[in-house]
Amino acid sequence: MTTSTTDSEAARASRFRWVICGLLFFGLVINYVDRQMLGVLKPTLSKEFGWSEVEYADIVFWFQAAYAAGYLAFGRIVDKVGAKIGYAVAFTIWNIAHIAHGFAGSLTQFIWTRVALGLGESGVFPAGIKAVAEWFPRKERAFATGIFNAGSNIGAIVTPLVVPAITIAYGWQWAFILTGIVSFIWLAAWLLVYRSPDRHRRVNSPELAHIRQDPPDQGAATPWTRVLRTRETWAYALGKFLIDPIWWFFLFWLPGYLVQRYGLDIKTFGPPLVVVYLMSDAGSILGGWYSSRLIGKGVPVGRARKLTMLICSLCVLPIIGAQYISSLWAAVAVIGLATAAHQGFSANLYTLPSDVFPRNAVGSVIGIGGTVGAIGGMLFSKYVGQILDQIGSYTPIFVVAGSVYLIAVAGIQLLAPRYEPANVQ
């Protein structure tokens, strides 16, 4: 076959893998609407139920505890049943739990609904990363992950725009109920559209060859005992332990921070949050694109990922002084830069399992890392609640937020210096 013929076939290749990426994107939009709604409604619910910062932190803590337990379980479940069924089960659990928030009437009931939400939401990234590993070659995975991970920011943008309007018109209960009912449309689309690329009628031979260009995996599912013994597993888990709590802090406390520091309310904190999460969206896509671009230029995969994460780590540093910025929009710019850098960092960290582990171990590694990240989030939530109740200042919190990304890069380099295929045999 001549080169021109090969090029012609490549030009005719279908691109259905990007439709799958779009489905993952919209699934994450819904996921983050459901997750962030408590943060957006924090001022309203705290006033209605009389929650202290510590009590609110307890709700977040138990959500993260369930998320940690569920993440570990779903990682293994997804490896066994596949991305399609795993994601569908997770979605059903979390969306029913989300609707149930509308019927909660006490701190205890909110804790239980958040526990159920955390169990369901824990399946999103194991299934999503598994789907990316199934549908994209290694060189495209960071970019694809960055695109679908950007759905978290769109969800975070939609929430402060839609939820206040529903709350003002119908009450906070209907904000949970209506968004949950509408979200089931996505589940129907997922079940109708998703299947593996080699069995999908919309994928032609050139695209399938493109997807399968990496060496095939060998053997059955990798036992956890082998996954847990690899340094690469703990490089990923350490990164998640350090950076996940910071993202959750922004999701659950940023609306309250804007209310306290700049005197905003449910009617006015929407635009600043929209700007912050638009910047986050750009960071997610650019972070994935930049490392993929470096790889395309011949830079080794590990070096490209780590260099991108280092750049993102440096961009987070200005958040340390955010508490002292008197201008709302200057603070929004600094916070938005930090959240954008987080998402760029995260897009590359999420590709580590699929870069160095066989596909049959990816879900398990993602599950372990997600569990460790959620444990970090639990500890940080307790810390935030205590700091705000005792001294009422966000400065110590922002100092931690600005510092941990550089520590994460150093830890990943120490544990996975060569970024080579993990030895799980």
Image (cartoon, rainbow, N blue to C red):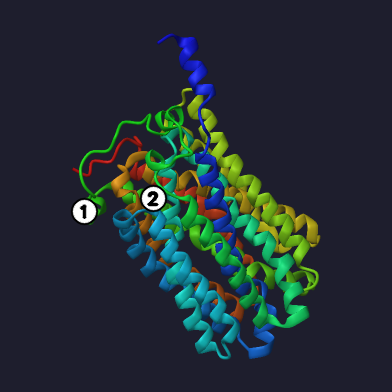
| In the image, residue 94 above or below residue 101 | above
Residue ID at (43%, 65%): 90
Say whether residue 27 is visible: yes
Quarter of the figure with residue 418: top left
Relative to 189, 182 lies left or right: right
Residue 158, horizontal then vertical, whole percent: 69, 62
Disc sitting over residue 236 in the figure: 2
Which amino acid does the dot numbered 2 rest on? Tyr
Q: Earlier in the sequence, mark 1 or mark 2?
A: 1
Q: Secondary structure at mark 2?
A: helix
Which quarter of the rendered picture does the N terminus lie within?
top left
Which amino acid does the dot numbered 1 rest on? Pro
| Residue closest to the eye, 5 or 338 | 5
Residue 312, horizontal then vertical, whole percent: 57, 44
Q: Is disc 1 surrounded by few (<14), some (14 to 19) or many (20+) residues within 10 Å?
A: some
Quarter of the figure with residue 66: bottom left
Quarter of the figure with residue 119: bottom left
Relative to 376, 398 lies left or right: right
Disc sitting over residue 223 in the figure: 1
Q: Secondary structure at mark 1?
A: loop
Residue ID at (50%, 80%): 113
- The single residue placed furthest to the left in the displayed view is 425
| In the image, residue 414 above or below residue 158 | above
| In the image, residue 358 above or below residue 81 | above
Residue ID at (36%, 62%): 74
Q: Is disc 2 surrounded by few (<14), some (14 to 19) or many (20+) residues within 10 Å?
A: many
Badge 1 vs badge 2, beta-carbon distance below 8 Å: no
Residue 353, horizontal then vertical, whole percent: 37, 46
Measured Cα–Cα span from mark 1 to mark 2: 18 Å
| Residue closest to the eye, 372 or 293 | 293
Residue 63, horizontal then vertical, whole percent: 48, 74
Which quarter of the rendered picture does the C terminus lie within?
top left
